[in-house]
Image (cartoon, rainbow, N blue to C red):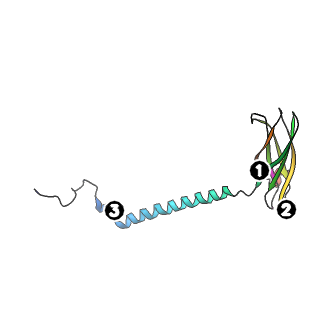
Amino acid sequence: MQQATGRPAGRYGDEGDRSPARRRTIVAGVAVLAAAFFGWVLWAALGAATPDIRADVTAFRVRSDAAVAVRVEVGSGSGPPVGCTVQALDRTRGVVGVGTITLDPSRPGRRAGWVTVRTRDRAVAAALGTCARVSPKEQD
């Protein structure tokens, strides 16, 4: 019996087609793409983890079945005014009213203000919606 010393020709692909230099180029290209992707993911995660505007509902007072007063406190550093939406919630956590408040950046540090939100039913809680910087065109 004779033992085979190599692979049968053509059975496992032709190894002569791929040179080591081509393999290194492909591996390097994949590594660069992977590094770019992970860099972008890290950049996006850090940007989302440290928002430039921090806002909280610090108090609310139910005025009647049709209105609730909400105190919003915002810390955003200097810059244009900050506009926030505020939601009034009923006992099932359903939204029964929405209001907006714009806080002026002229005072340094955290800024606070009260907004009255009209409701269609009695509110028992208040929650902050979204906050964003307001451009000068949106203020008018």
Instruction: Say few, some or many: other residues with alpha carbon within 10 Å of mark 2 (under 14 / 14 to 19 / 20 or more).
Output: few
Q: Amino acid at mark 1?
A: Cys
What is the distance, in whole Å, between disc 1 and disc 3 at their CAs? 56 Å
- Residue drawn 43% across the image and 63% down it: 27
Magenta run includes residue 33: no
What is the distance, in whole Å, between disc 3 and disc 2 at their CAs? 65 Å
Residue holding disc 2? 108
Q: Quadrant of the N terminus?
A: bottom left
Q: Amino acid at mark 3?
A: Arg
Span highlighted in magenta in the image: 78-83
Question: Seen in the image, is 14 located left or right of residue 94?
Answer: left
What is the distance, in whole Å, between disc 2 and disc 1 at their CAs? 18 Å
Position in image of residue 134 (x %, y %): 80, 53
Question: Seen in the image, is 85 located left or right of residue 4?
Answer: right
Question: Seen in the image, is 37 located left or right of residue 45?
Answer: left
Instruction: Say few, some or many: other residues with alpha carbon within 10 Å of mark 3 (under 14 / 14 to 19 / 20 or more).
Output: few
- Residue drawn 28% across the image and 58% down it: 14
Of tags 2 and 1, the one toward the viewer is 2
Q: Which mark is residue 18?
A: 3
Q: Quadrant of residue 46?
A: bottom right
Position in image of residue 64 (x %, y %): 89, 35
Q: Amino acid at mark 2?
A: Pro
Q: Is residue 128 above or below residue 89?
A: below
Residue holding disc 1? 131
Q: Could you tell which of marks 2 and 1 lies nearer the N-terminus?
A: 2
